[in-house]
Amino acid sequence: MNNKSILGGMLLVTGTTIGAGMLALPASISQNGFYGATLMLLLCWVSTTFSALLLLEANLRLPINSNIISMAKKTLGPLGAIVAWLSYLLLLYSLLSAYIAGGSDVLGGLLVAGNIPSLHWLDELLFAGILGIIVYRGIKTVDYVNRGLMSTKFIAIVLLIISLIPFIHVSHLTGISAVHLPMAVTVVVTSFGYAVIIPSIRTYYNSDVAKLRKIIIVGSFIPLLGYFLWVSVVLAVLPMIGHLSLVQIFQSADPNTQLTQALSFYSRSEWITVVTRVFTSVCMATSFLGVSLCLSDFLADGMNVKKHGRGAFLIYVMTFVPPLLIVLFYPAIFIKSLSYAGIFCAILLIILPVLMVWSGRRKVEKGADYQVRGGKPAMVIVLLAAVVIIVFGLYENFF
């Protein structure tokens, strides 16, 4: 396999996408009914894929190694750069906080299962420290480690879904509702928040547009299928209310451990417990790697600092210390962080790409660069959808 094969890029997108969001999805969207959850997944995938291609278009107009700060400043001016800075930092710090909280929860569960004493703060430091070393070594190391983890993830999710099929209740898969639509939408949008990695993979694949388009479309479609199957199976196995139910998991301070316990309890299978623990562990690791890589590249670009020597030390301190501090003081922040992230995701990965492309197309001749199909009507629709997501997120978190 070529070191820069298209498969590696697809797995980077898929690995960045499928993580903490996948584990939070069943509990967060279950109360909207099976059909409501399915429709929400599909609409969010269409919107985020379109905006991801817009982000690629905007990035290709600038020199290689340009990140979102450079893109926003060039196309939208100083105000655009400030909005990009704030929304990017808030989004990625929210995601890393969620991944560290969820990952340490999973790590603690594994240690307890192995009769090893576990402390929340130590689990958080171990999770971030071990994976942080991989990110420090650069995108090639992340790529190779991610390929191995993704292979494990695919095997685990297939085995888990097959193992759970005998315990499903098809009668659970009914209905459509908007009872908890605000929280559900923000979590689902966050679950497709892979576009932050586009500037990095554009550099890695040396602006090969044909490869990059396939990587984005196929790499994001794989998680859509995975989310649908995962949500369907979990909703069919677990009850909505009661002991170890979807509602109880949603309200829990350690939802990943609760999810593992619930699937084990209702299937009465130790095998499913083992596979679920492997799956949740790898989900956290792959997303942490992808988002950490994006944040470090973003900080290096925005601060104009080379990722070598003292510059690298500064960048990685700024990447990992803030989310670690958040989780150390607020360990039960997993699902809440994903909800906050949905607001910033809509601003950074939907609204800003639309505005950057809109501005960029006015400054170049028609057909001079790669352009996403759909024109202004499609961009307006996606822009309005992002505004609705932000309103839902603000309502859910602050009112």
Image (tube, grey):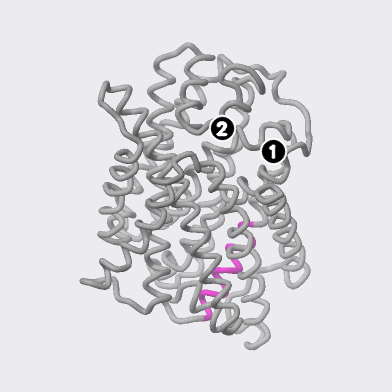
Q: CA distance from mark 1 to mark 2?
A: 11 Å
Along the horizontal axis of the image, is 169 left or right of 249?
A: right
The residue at the point 53 percent across, 45 percent down is 222
On whether residue 304 falls in the magenta region, the answer is no
Q: Position of residue 354 (x, y in %)?
A: 66, 70
**Which residue, as the protein is rendered here, is positioned at the far front?**
329
Vertical side of 380 occupied by 136: above or below: above
Mark 2, secondary structure of its residue = helix
The residue singled out by tag 2 in the image is 230
Q: Position of residue 398 (x, y in %)?
A: 67, 51
Q: Which mark is residue 186?
A: none
**Rendered position, 248 above or below 181:** above
Q: Number of callouts in the render?
A: 2
Instruction: Identify the residue at horizontal 56%, vertical 44% (top origin).
Output: 336
Q: Residue at x 61, y 46 (%)?
A: 187
Q: Is 88 or 381 nearer to us in this picture?
A: 88
**Tag 1's secondary structure?**
helix
Residue 79 figure quarter: bottom right
Q: Residue at 66% across / 23% down in the picture? A: 240
- Bounds of the magenta segment: 48-61
Q: Residues within 10 Å of mark 2 (few under 14, many from 20)?
A: many
Instruction: Looking at this view, name the residue that lies furthest to the top.
Output: 268
Image spot of residue 386 (x, y percent): 70, 60
Q: Main secondary structure of the magenta part?
A: helix
- Quadrant in the picture for residue 285: top left
1 or 2: tag closer to the N-terminus: 1
**Pointer 1 residue:** 38
